[in-house]
Image (spheres, grey):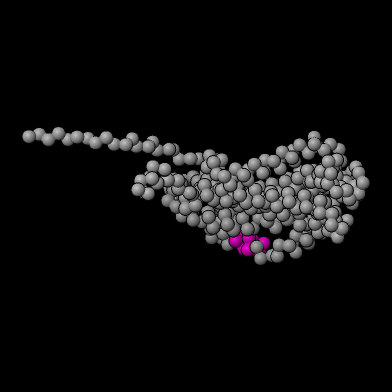
Amino acid sequence: MTTAILKQPTEPTAARKPNRSFVHGLITNKKALVGMIVMLVFIAFALLAPVLFPGDPSRITAMASLEPSPEHWLGTTAKGQDVLALTVHGSRSSLFVGLTVGFASTFIGILVGLASAYFGKFIDEALSLVTNVFLLLPGLPLLVILAAFLPPGLGTVILVLVVTGWAGSARVLRSQALSIRSKDFVAAAVVSGERAGRIMFREILPNMASIVMGTLLGCVIYGIGAQAGLEFLGLGDVSTVSWGNNLFWAGNEGALLTGSWWVFVPSGVCIALVAFALALINYAVDEVTNPRLRKIKTPKNTERSAAK
């Protein structure tokens, strides 16, 4: 007798989804989406500031120390300046300094970290010594000394912040590059005779994308916060309009003593919101690139069968 083998109907297997790209992972991440929306709003205000508030934002337009009203949404300062105009125009300087310091510090950190990890020996010892010196120097006193003796201006603030902010990123990137330097594909590239620059920037650097992104965001936050701190101490160019200078003039004009909260709260809230948005993006980058932090979604059918 021949036994007929009956094939039981099987459930159709779900098609495998292709690996999501880094950009797609960020777009679908809620934290990154919120952070990017907040940053886009601030960037839009910074770009449209001359259109929304044409002319000099520091000019006197009304009576002094007016509370928020339909005519002046955020009130006026002790000089009669419109606080909303100062806040919107201040985003241009603060975001420009933060982004410039972030990219410059990260770029220097990448160069130092890659060169130190790849070449090793004497170059690694020399670069590590320089990095350790900058890490051991107290940050705030060094910032104050450099800003006090250099001529005031936006370029001076950027230079001071880059000089004092690159060492931390270099140390982090060096440790990551050292772990990748020992991989087999890097050794194969060295044996095949590829140039050092090509190996560092085409083989090692792409595998450090997540840590580079996190370092960049951290440096941008540092740049915005440190600029505000320097200008609040009066070590920046007080003639420019920025969030730090807004806080400086609010303190000098006695806004804290008189209870004129509408003068200093907007700039402080803007700094906090930008730092919060960048921190959300940084957390999202970790979730997208680190498999241990990804949330595994279980299908509803599986949940129902498990419950039964």
Which one is nearer the viewer's eye here, 192 or 294? Answer: 294
Position of residue 75 in the picture relative to residue 224 (left or right): right
Residue 216 rendering spot, x and y as whole percentages: 62, 49
Task: Please give the name of the residue rendered at 24% of the width and 36% of the height, measured from the top-left corner.
Answer: 8
Task: Please give the name of the residue rendered at 57% of the width and 59% of the height, measured from the top-left corner.
Answer: 124
Residue 236 seen from this side = no
Position of residue 198 in the picture relative to residue 76 (left or right): left
Task: Please give the name of the residue rendered at 54% of the width and 60% of the height, measured from the top-left corner.
Answer: 121
Residue 272 rendering spot, x and y as whole percentages: 70, 52
Residue 298 seen from this side = yes
| The furthest residue to the right | 63
Position of residue 252 in the picture relative to residue 33 (left or right): right
Which one is nearer the viewer's eye here, 122 or 302? Answer: 302
Which one is nearer the viewer's eye here, 129 or 247? Answer: 247
| The furthest residue to the front | 308
Location of residue 88 (image quadrant):
top right
User: In the image, is residue 160 above or below residue 303?
Assistant: below
Tell me which segment is drawn in magenta.
Answer: 127-134
Q: Quadrant of the N terminus?
A: top left
Position of residue 154 in the picture relative to residue 20 (left or right): right
